[in-house]
Amino acid sequence: DFEGAIAVFRKALEDDPTIVENQLGMAIASEGLGDIVEAKKRYRNVGKITPEEKNELASTGWQNLARINITENELPNAVKHGRLSLERNPKNLEARLTLCRTLALSGLEEEAVEQMYIVYTMDPTYLLKFKTESTYTPTFLLKFYQKILEVKKIVNFNRGELDFLYNEFVILKEDKEASIVLKYLLNKNPRFVLKKYQDGMIVSDEIKKSLMEMINTMITEKSDLHSSEDWYALSFLALRIAGDNELLVFKLFTLGAKNNANYQRKDKERVLQHL
């Protein structure tokens, strides 16, 4: 009930106009009723409060004002108020996302990428959140993902992050970057990569070629980082990509069976039937 809330907050502000929480409540209720002029005035009042202990509220005020600026296509003001929000509270991820969106809309993609990377370093789960925005162009997304690969050592990524980046590069049709990410994903979890192949997520010839190069490298180095089940997954992955290479498949199978007789007995015929 925004009308009831406005009546309550108006009375509270008459009694004591210095209570910033009431200013914020009045702003939210006014925006809810569609009184944008009043809402902007109240959000600005919230942003201008000076006590240091109120920095989070002040940041919220400027952030909401920036958000309204975007909807009204007042991009210079949105950038200005977004920066003010972060001055009051640099940890405000929503404010940083709002500023990032504004910078991207304003054509300032390089700075937008830098801001998005700060968000990523503070909370990687925001990768999924910002993707819901339609603001970001493929060019921006590619620059951002390349920034992640450039700054953060890829060996430090977990499987979820690698999978996310791989899928994004595939969507953007950037096979080179997708291949780089998939190689590390293969090294971490061959069974997961096999499942992606079975699900139709690996279709590019360039990516398949890169995978086969990685599999050959793993054979040459006789990697001991994988279980027999992982070597089994590599066997079937190789069968699907290069099924006519019987020698390669048997090398993979041998590495999988090396220390696991049960693997050999259980799966030998399953490998042979595909040759």
Image (cartoon, rainbow, N blue to C red):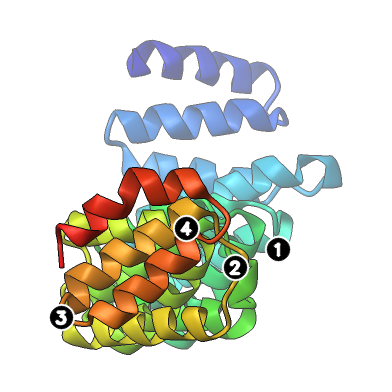
Are the two marked residues, 4 and 1, in contact with CB atoms closer than 8 angstroms? no
- For residue 110, side relative to residue 245 (left or right): right
**What's the amino acid at mark 2?**
Arg
Q: Residue furthest right?
A: 52
Q: Secondary structure at mark 3?
A: loop
Is the Cβ of the residue at disc 1 closer than 8 Å to that at disc 2? yes
Q: Along the polypeptide, which appears first: circle 3 or circle 2?
A: 2
Residue that badge 3 annotates: 244
- Report whether 243 appears left or right of 6: left
Q: Residues within 10 Å of mark 1 (few under 14, many from 20)?
A: some
Residue 257's tag is: 4
Q: Is there CB contact under 8 Å for labels 3 and 1?
A: no
Q: Position of residue 33 (x, y in %)?
A: 29, 28
Q: Residues within 10 Å of mark 2 (few under 14, many from 20)?
A: many
> Which marked residue is nearer to the observer: mark 3 or mark 2?
3
Q: Is 230 in front, or is 200?
A: 230
The percent coordinates of residue 2 (x first, y second) are 35, 18
Q: From the viewer's perspective, is the residue at label 4 or at label 2 nearer? A: 4
Coordinates of residue 257 in the picture (x, y in percent)? 47, 58
What distance separates the C-alpha of mark 4 from that of mark 1? Answer: 60 Å
- Position of the N terminus, as image quadrant, is top left
Name the amino acid, label 4. Answer: Ala
Pointer 2 residue: 83
Tell me how far mark 4 sits from mark 2, CA to CA. Answer: 60 Å
Q: Is residue 230 visible?
A: yes
CA distance for labels 1 and 2: 6 Å
The secondary element bearing badge 4 is classed as helix
- Residue flagged by tag 1: what amino acid is it? Glu
CB under 8 Å between callouts 4 and 3?
A: no
